[in-house]
Image (cartoon, rainbow, N blue to C red):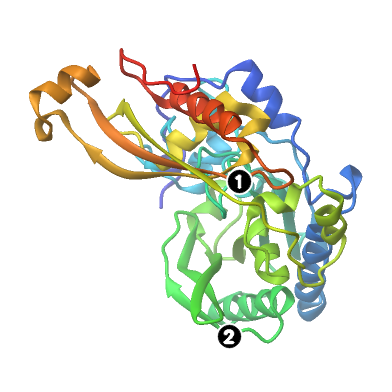
Amino acid sequence: MSSASLLASSPAPVQRLSPDALRAALSLRDLTDPAQGQHAMQTLLSDVVQAVSRAWKVPARIHRPGPVVTVEDNYDRLGFSTGDVTRDVRYSRYLSPTVMLRSHTSAAMPPVLRALNSDTDADALHVIPGLSYRRDAIDRTHVGEPHQLDLWRVGCAARMGLADLHGLLELVVHAVLPGAQWRTVRSPHPYTTLGVQLDVRVGHEWLELAEAGLVAPGILAQAGLSPNAWSGVALGMGLDRALMLRKGIQDIRLLRSADPRVAGQMQDLSPYRVVSALPSITRDLSVVVPADADEETLGDQVRETLGVQAGELESVSVLARTGPDELPEGAVRRLGLVAGQVNALLRIVIRPLTRTMTDAEANALRDRVYLAVHRGPHLELISR
């Protein structure tokens, strides 16, 4: 991979994050940071870092840079192509054509690599925990601001290879889920070679835990580090998923719950004891949306419009999508569909974590979701 391809200019985004959305993102508590209060996620993070650092006998260096990064560090210097779909404004949160909220904690590594020195950084484990910012679906396992962990062992003291990669995977699995079965599935990444997806067996299922690979020579070269002397292994893991698997938690919203019965259980890694489950309320919505809308972009629109009230939604899913050419002419007129739009059937599941919701409240919330995503000229509201 050449330096020219790594640093190809990024396409200018056409949509920027609103000031209110930026303030909301930056005010969100980082559960990995002890300075913002104790949380079980910090214990899990510490267990992983200590297991790897001690086994490899290398120092662990924790980096906590701010979430605002350059597009160059987030994408270009990590080898993403200019046409990569992840760059699209539907999935990334841009502040300007050259600055964004990081979409992964890996965005902190290009500056770290540029600062390395063979005299003082011969071999070290670089640890980058924290929030990343995406546009994502609303369901029990996804949020728009997931916690991530990047572990990069980079050095020039010894050549790292496949054995080191497998060693890292084994150490991480046994720190997160002691004794769990694990496997790897080939999964190429732009900033690694021999990239793999790490799966763990939970019950009868194989679930993704992390992705990893050897640091690509081109990534080192563009940071001024000779690939002939320097090498490394890199792993990225979702800490929300890891903690949920460790404690047996089924709903990601519980990690931030203010209910004392739940919050008290988020102070350690003991198995989660289920707090009385409240009944769910389901509403189906027929809406007009852009043809390229998906669960990730629709979920993000709902989060931005509803703010904290979005936490009362268990899921927002797309049941069906129908284009104008698949509908009777009368239905097209009734919906007001135009070119570039489709009729989508959405299902929202409402289940507040700490209270029972009345039908009237559920209908009002249904209408707020409807107004957040519907792009047709005619409205079908049920709470007015």
Is the residue 242 above or below the residue 30 in the image?
A: below
Residue furthest front in the image: 359
- The residue at 56%/50% (across/down) is 142
Identify the residue at the far top of this view.
377
Q: Nearer the viewer, residue 139 or 33?
A: 139
Element on which disc 2 rests: loop
Q: Is residue 116 visible?
A: no
Asked if disc 2 and disc 1 are in contact, CB closer than 8 Å, the reply is no
Q: Which mark is residue 351?
A: 1
Residue 324 drawn at (x, y percent): 15, 28
Residue shown at 58% from the left, 18% from the top:
18
Quadrant assignment, res 39 = bottom right
The mark closer to the camera, 2 or 1, is: 1
Could you give the CA–CA distance between mark 2 and mark 1, rounded to whole angstroms? 33 Å
Residue 89 location in percent, x, y?
A: 44, 29
Q: Give the answer, above or below, for where 263 lies relative to 270.
A: above
Residue type, label 2: Gln
Residue that numbered label 2 is attached to: 181
Q: Which mark is residue 13?
A: none
Residue 163 percent across, percent down from the top left: 58, 83
The amino acid sitting under disc 1 is Arg
- Name the residue: 70% across, 23% down: 23
Residue at image position (74%, 35%) is 28
Crowding near the residue tagged with mark 2, few <14, some 14–19, many ≥20 C-alpha atoms within 10 Å: some
